[in-house]
């Protein structure tokens, strides 16, 4: 092959690479025109219930417990900051249709500002929920001729737990809960045998890490006294879900603490 022929092949290859690169950049470039069409309040075409309001690059859900989500439109997809992506079927100034996580077609209509003010409170901040039962309990128990006084205190914190779920439109939303710290104290007369706080991170050896990320330390209850010591049961649950772990904490009469998993 001549040098000239080789040069033409190299030039063609470079042009091909540049062309492919340009196509890739174009495929990942945000569609700002489509984002502009999203601005406003959208209602479900069938139920007329408010689904969300879009302001700038943020979706604010009508559900008072769902956190706002940043979004972008690239190609024919609506992508949320969580990584969830939805295929857009139709988009105009007043109509927005997409496929939710189940593949169902969801069609929304934009409503005018006057109607929106009566249906949607634009400055409402999402509610961060607490997940607690009784705040403080205590009692006395006798075993082998000795009396023991135990205390349990449930202390709500500002530690946030994010749970991802799906709303009525099949869009992924984030609900936020405040976690709890549990405190257990055990006394024999005036002598303190044991006193300590419990956080959900202390259960990593018994509860899967992935579960703990969305779980709240929901409750602590006294169970019984036997030869091992005083037994307390901690409940770790994913809020508003059916999944919970029950972990037993045993405080021996010498003040030693051990844990074991009871059930899931």
Image: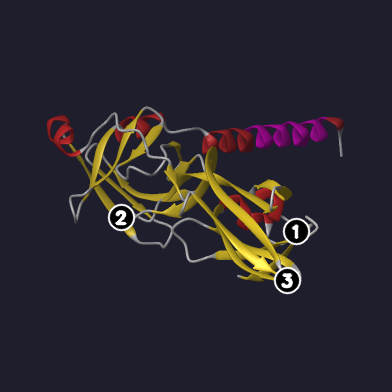
Residue drawn 67% across and 61% down? 147
Residue nearer the viewer, 98 or 221:
221
Estimate the spatial distance between the alpha carbons at disc 3 and disc 2, rounded to whole Å.
66 Å
Label 1: which secondary element? loop
Residue at the disc numbered 1: 205
Q: Viewed as shown, does residue 92 lie left or right of 146?
A: left
Q: Are marks 3 and 2 in contact (CB under 8 Å)?
A: no
Q: Viewed as shown, does residue 38 lie left or right of 72?
A: left
Residue nearer the viewer, 97 or 126:
126
Say if the magenta span includes residue 112: no
Residue drawn 76% across and 69% down? 228
Q: Are marks 1 and 3 in contact (CB under 8 Å)?
A: no
Residue at the disc numbered 3: 144
Answer above or below: position of 46 versus 116. Answer: below
**Which region of the structure is painted magenta?**
4-18
Residue nearer the viewer, 263 or 48:
263
Q: Are marks 1 and 2 in contact (CB under 8 Å)?
A: no
Q: Badge 2: how crowded within 10 Å, few (<14), some, or many (20+)?
A: some
Residue at the disc numbered 2: 106
Colour mode of the rendering? secondary structure
Label 3: which secondary element? loop
Q: Viewed as shown, does residue 121 lie left or right of 142?
A: left
Q: Badge 3: how crowded within 10 Å, few (<14), some, or many (20+)?
A: few
Say if the magenta span includes residue 11: yes
Q: Viewed as shown, does residue 134 lie left or right of 236?
A: left
Quadrant into which the N terminus falls: top right
Q: Position of residue 68 (x, y in %)?
A: 41, 37
């Amino acid at each position: 092959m001549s040098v000239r022929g080789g040069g033409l092949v190299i030039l063609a290859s470079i042009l091909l690479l540049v062309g492919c690169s340009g196509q890739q950049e174009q495929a990942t470039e945000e569609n700002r025109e489509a984002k502009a069409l999203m601005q406003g309040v959208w209602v479900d075409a069938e139920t007329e219930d408010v689904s969300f309001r879009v302001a700038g690059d943020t979706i604010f859900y009508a559900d008072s417990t769902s956190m706002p989500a940043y979004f972008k439109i690239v190609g024919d997809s609506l992508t949320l900051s969580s990584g969830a992506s939805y295929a857009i079927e139709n988009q105009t100034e007043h109509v927005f249709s997409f496929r939710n996580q189940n593949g169902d077609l969801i069609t929304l209509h934009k409503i005018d500002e006057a109607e929106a003010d009566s249906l949607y409170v634009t400055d409402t901040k999402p509610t961060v929920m607490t997940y607690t039962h009784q705040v403080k309990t205590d009692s006395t128990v006798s075993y082998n001729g000795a009396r023991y006084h135990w205390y349990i205190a449930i202390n709500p914190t500002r530690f946030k737990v994010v749970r991802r779920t799906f709303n009525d439109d099949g869009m992924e939303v984030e609900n936020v809960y405040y976690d709890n710290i549990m405190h257990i104290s055990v006394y024999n007369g005036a002598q303190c045998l044991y006193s300590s706080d419990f956080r959900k991170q202390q259960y990593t050896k018994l509860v899967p890490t992935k579960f703990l990320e969305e779980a709240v330390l929901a409750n602590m209850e006294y169970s019984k006294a036997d030869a091992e010591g005083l037994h307390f049961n901690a409940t770790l649950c994913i809020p508003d879900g059916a999944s919970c772990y029950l972990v037993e904490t045993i405080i021996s009469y010498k003040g030693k603490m051990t844990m074991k998993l009871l059930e899931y």
